[in-house]
Amino acid sequence: MEVKTNPMRHLDKLGIPYKVHTYGDVALSGTEVAETLGQDPAQVFKTLVTVGKPKCYYVFLVPVTGGLDLKKAAASVGEKSVSMIRQDELLPLTGYVHGGCSPLCTKRPMRVTIDSTAEGKDVIFFSAGKIGYQLEVSVRDLPRMMEFSFADVRKPGQT
């Protein structure tokens, strides 16, 4: 039986082409996902959810090869500071579990920022909203699938 997640349905509805890549039903680190799929880790992005002011939540996509610089992230969204949400908050806020969080179709609308390294890529990969499923999408289609901005939000010295 073919699995369709909400992000896949969203892209289908918009007529945006995508490819689904699967790697099983075990949560892996981002670099393990890239390795398992045989993809360049600089093109595979992890979805990180943060909170700024009370009840102001933000989604950041950064390459799996690095981490989120919280000061840069805060500046990119006009906050004094942001912090990672607690893992037990992820499902109620987004509808996704850790390891399967997508920037698309979150329960609560959130501002999305994608690390600027994505701008130079033809395609990027991110979670399809279920552990074991990744979406491959064209960077030029990103504006049609979600509102977002590009910003340098990864930790210094990382690619």
Image (cartoon, rainbow, N blue to C red):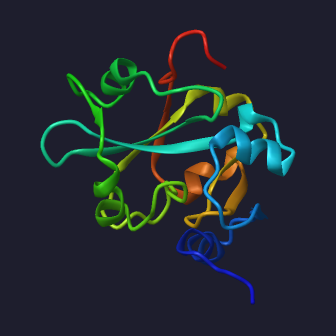
Q: How many numbered marks have been drawn onto this rendered protein structure?
A: 0
Residue 152, image x and y in percent? 51, 21
Residue 9, image x and y in percent? 59, 77
Question: Nearest the camera: 81 or 79?
Answer: 81
Residue shown at the point (58%, 27%) measured from the top left: 116
Image quadrant for the N terminus?
bottom right
Residue reaching furthest bottom?
1
Residue 7 visible to the viewer: yes
Residue reaching furthest right?
38
Q: Is residue 21 above or below residue 77?
A: below
| Left-right relation of 117 to 72 | right
Residue shown at the point (65%, 75%) measured from the top left: 12
Residue 120, image x and y in percent? 72, 28
| Left-right relation of 128 to 18 | left
Residue shown at the point (68%, 72%) measured from the top left: 15
Question: Nearest the camera: 63 or 35?
Answer: 35
Question: Nearest the camera: 25 or 10?
Answer: 25
Residue 158, image x and y in percent? 62, 16
| Left-right relation of 39 to 145 | right
